[in-house]
Image (cartoon, rainbow, N blue to C red):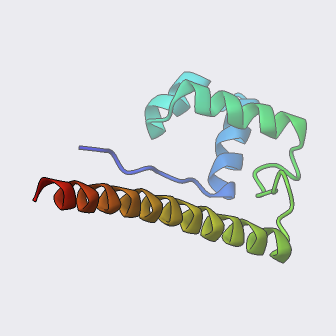
Amino acid sequence: MQLAKRSFNREFKIQVCEEIESKLKTQAQVIREHSLATSLISKWMREYRSDPNGCFTRREKYPVSIQDVKIKALEAALGRATYENQVLKEANALLKKVSMERRFTK
């Protein structure tokens, strides 16, 4: 059984970080209260301290353009076609071998 992955919105993360920063609650209290991992709180605090106003906004590491998406799809299609071609060549060779064996065994 796999637990469902929880996701937290920006406001919740900021609220948790502000509670810890303003010393309203300790990190341990927040962890117990919300059943969070210590590493997750540490990660949130690092991001919050580095940029309190712009933290927890989704930023792409590498901006993805439409061309990049199309190229990726074409590369995937080419890979599938290449694989299918290889399988068909191997099947054809096997059929030829079986056919030749049947001719000489009769």
- Residue at the far left: name it: 106
The quadrant in which the C terminus is found is bottom left
x then y, percent, for residue 79: 61, 61
In this view, 99 is above or below 20: below
Left/right placement of residue 25 relative to residue 71 reads left
Q: Residue at the location (76% across, 58% down)?
A: 58
Asked if residue 25 can be seen in this view, the reply is no
In this view, 35 is above or below 92: above
In this view, 85 is above or below 40: below
Q: Residue at the location (58% across, 63% down)?
A: 82
Q: How many marks?
A: 0
x then y, percent, for residue 51: 89, 43
The quadrant in which the N terminus is found is top left
The one nearer the camera, 16 or 79, is: 79
Left/right placement of residue 20 relative to residue 83 reads right
Residue 41 falls in image quadrant: top right
Q: Residue at the location (47% across, 40% down)?
A: 34
In this view, 67 is above or below 92: below
Residue 87 falls in image quadrant: bottom left
The one nearer the camera, 18 or 45, is: 45
Residue 30 falls in image quadrant: top right
Q: Residue at the location (50% across, 59% down)?
A: 86
Left/right placement of residue 84 relative to residue 13 reads left
The one nearer the camera, 54 or 20, is: 54
x then y, percent, for residue 59: 81, 56
x then y, percent, for residue 100: 27, 58
The one nearer the camera, 83 or 103, is: 103
Asked if residue 81 can be seen in this view, the reply is yes
